[in-house]
Amino acid sequence: MRLRVRFFSALRRVTGQSELDYNFSGRTAGQLWDDLSQRFPELTPFTESRAIAVNLKHTTPGHVLKEGDEVAFFPPVSGG
Amino acid sequence: MLAELRKAPITLEEALESLNRNGAGAVVTMCGLSRPTDAEGTPLSHLDYEAYREMAERQMEAICSETRRRWPIIDIVMLHRVGSVGIGEPSVIIVVASAHRREAFYACQFAIDKLKETVPIWKEEVPLQTASSGSAKGSIGRPSGSDSKNKRP
């Protein structure tokens, strides 16, 4: 399936990418993270702390993705 | 009700102007300012705020709506900066109007706590000595233990 992947803050800096059109053959957001960590090993240290959002909503690694989803990965928020 | 993410400066005066105060007996204001030093006392040049804009704006609106559902307030306004914020400038402003003070205090506390916990915005502290070279030192939100300066304030 085709996905739009977005990285923010430190994840954007370590990957050098803010967004990608990504062809994904897995099923869940967690599997997508693992896939991306193979491509960008710099992501690995963030595995425990990163958050996931699908189509602008917070979600969990078990979220089942579908064609055209926008999947964002980012570190803990620090606004305010 | 107003929730806005903005690159231009925000002021308490404009937030209060946007707030519906008809019938209000209390207005509580929360104004978050950029501190001049980081957690270890290193002088800062400014803070850089990055946001996942589409999601952040949606969540700010959702927090304001939830706040209105939880407490009998009259109105709430929530403003947040993105981009470069100078030392001493407001980075976030929340104002709440209600008939009595207690619900305005509770509502304002809830709204700022929820914003800081959930809205996808990140601040980066730019030290004074490296600001001219263009490299920021402390991004909040790196993996824990990677850099002692990157702790959340």
Image (spheres, coloured by chain):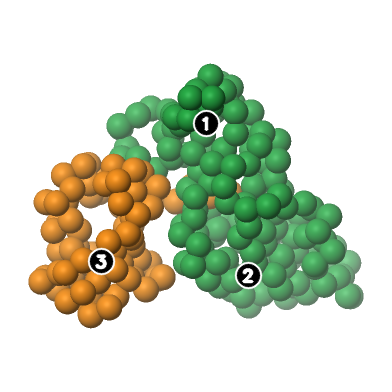
Chain colours: A orange, B green
Same-chain status of marks 3 and 2: no
Same-chain status of marks 3 and 1: no
Give the labeled residue for mark 1: B126
Q: What's the residue at 64%, 47% (across, down)?
A: B91
Kindly state the secondary structure of the residue where label 2 is placed: helix
Kindly state the secondary structure of the residue where label 3 is placed: strand
Same-chain status of marks 2 and 1: yes
Question: x, y (%) of residue A9?
Answer: 40, 47
Q: CA distance from mark 3 to mark 2?
A: 33 Å
Residue B18 can be seen in this image: yes
Residue A74 can be seen in this image: no
Question: x, y (%) of residue B68?
Answer: 66, 74
Q: Are marks 3 and 1 in contact (CB under 8 Å)?
A: no
Question: x, y (%) of residue B18?
Answer: 80, 67
Q: What's the residue at 48%, 24% (across, down)?
A: B133
Kindly state the secondary structure of the residue where label 1 is placed: strand
Residue type beneath disc 3: Asp
Question: In which image quadrant can residue B20 be found?
Answer: bottom right
| Badge nearest the viewer, 3 or 1 | 3
Q: Which mark is residue B64?
A: 2
Question: x, y (%) of residue B138?
Answer: 44, 32
Residue type beneath disc 1: Val
Residue type beneath disc 2: Cys
Which chain contains the residue that carries disc 1? B
Name the foreground residue: A15 vs B12.
Answer: A15
Q: CA distance from mark 3 to mark 1?
A: 32 Å
Q: Which mark is residue A21?
A: 3
User: How crowded is the residue under tag 1: few (<14 C-alpha within 10 Å), some, or many (20+)?
Assistant: many
Q: Residue furthest bottom?
A: A67
